[in-house]
Image (cartoon, helix red, strand yellow):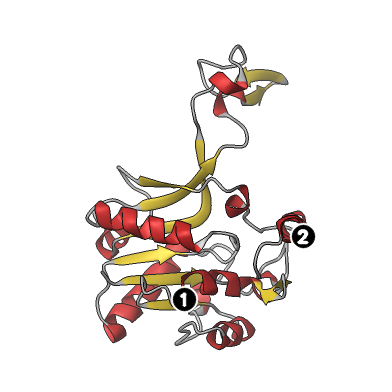
């Protein structure tokens, strides 16, 4: 099964400038996502789509395929990620041959494990490529304990509410963590999304796997993980 690993890494982050090549544990952030899948034998290539020459140079130096810089119209603050995905997929299949799946690895999720990536690919294979696979983690805040504020008043976010339940009695709830998305090319082209009916859940239970770095606070959290558990760098 030919799986293309795709990493989207725009250069214009405003909340955390140059985050994709900022050093985390001695490695540029994007390299964590390249290394987790490179040389696994489960992907045919690791393609990085970026509009930034510095990111491109770092990615190439780490063994990723960076055949071009992303067109400017696909790299604005309002650009849709799926359009950049389809641009990369179309180029790859035109020049390198057809693939059976595209796995999107966001560079802001450095702590996804290789074991999780391989489990996700195996789930996709078992689903006969018909069902997307999406990475999820246990929800930090259970939806039955969440509220909306309406004219200053707390209104249960879900009609049935859940304040009467003990935490251990709450039904399991999971959230999309941004660390793993896998779908077939035909699904991406028809739905223009990695989401869809009958998605398969890649449950990632190790809390650091759900860290999605988008702010300085997130960055400090990631650094604390490295300090606390001596995670390999």
Of 159 and 217, the residue lying toward us = 217
Q: Is residue 96 above or below residue 185?
A: below
Mark 2 or 1 closer to N-term? Answer: 1
Q: Residues within 10 Å of mark 2 (few under 14, many from 20)?
A: few
Mark 2 lies on residue = 227
Q: Is residue 218 left or right of residue 37?
A: right
Residue at position x 54%, y 59% in the image: 112
Of circles 2 and 1, the one toward us is 2
Q: Tag 1, which secondary structure?
A: loop
Residue at position x 42%, y 57% in the image: 181
Where is residue 219? Give x, y as percent. Answer: 73, 60
Mark 1 lies on residue = 38
In the picture, which quadrant includes the C terminus?
A: bottom right
In the picture, which quadrant includes the N terminus?
A: bottom left
Q: Residues within 10 Å of mark 1 (few under 14, many from 20)?
A: some
Q: Is residue 80 visible?
A: no
Residue at position x 69%, y 70% in the image: 19
Q: Is residue 39 left or right of residue 55?
A: left
Q: Tag 2, which secondary structure?
A: helix
């Amino acid at each position: 099964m030919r799986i293309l690993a795709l990493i989207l890494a725009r250069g214009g982050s405003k909340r955390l400038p140059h985050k994709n090549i900022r050093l985390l544990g001695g490695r540029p952030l994007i390299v964590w996502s390249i290394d987790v899948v490179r040389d696994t034998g489960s992907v045919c290539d690791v393609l990085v789509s970026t509009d930034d020459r510095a990111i491109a140079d770092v990615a190439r130096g780490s063994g990723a395929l960076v055949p071009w810089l992303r067109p400017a119209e696909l790299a604005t603050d309002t650009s849709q990620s799926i359009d950049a995905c389809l641009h990369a997929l179309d180029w790859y299949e035109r020049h390198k041959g057809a693939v059976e799946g595209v796995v999107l690895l966001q560079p802001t999720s450095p702590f996804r494990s290789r074991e999780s990536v391989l489990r996700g690919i195996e789930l996709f294979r078992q689903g006969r490529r018909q069902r997307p696979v999406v990475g999820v983690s246990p929800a930090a805040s259970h939806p039955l304990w969440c509220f909306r504020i309406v004219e200053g008043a707390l209104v249960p976010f879900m009609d049935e509410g859940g304040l009467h339940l003990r935490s251990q009695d709450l039904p399991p709830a999971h959230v999309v963590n941004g660390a793993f998305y896998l779908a077939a090319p035909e699904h991406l082209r028809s739905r223009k999304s990695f989401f869809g009916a009958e998605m398969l859940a890649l449950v990632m239970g190790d809390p650091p796997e759900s860290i999605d770095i988008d702010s300085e606070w997130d960055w400090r959290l990631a650094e604390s993980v490295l300090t606390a558990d001596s995670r390999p760098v």
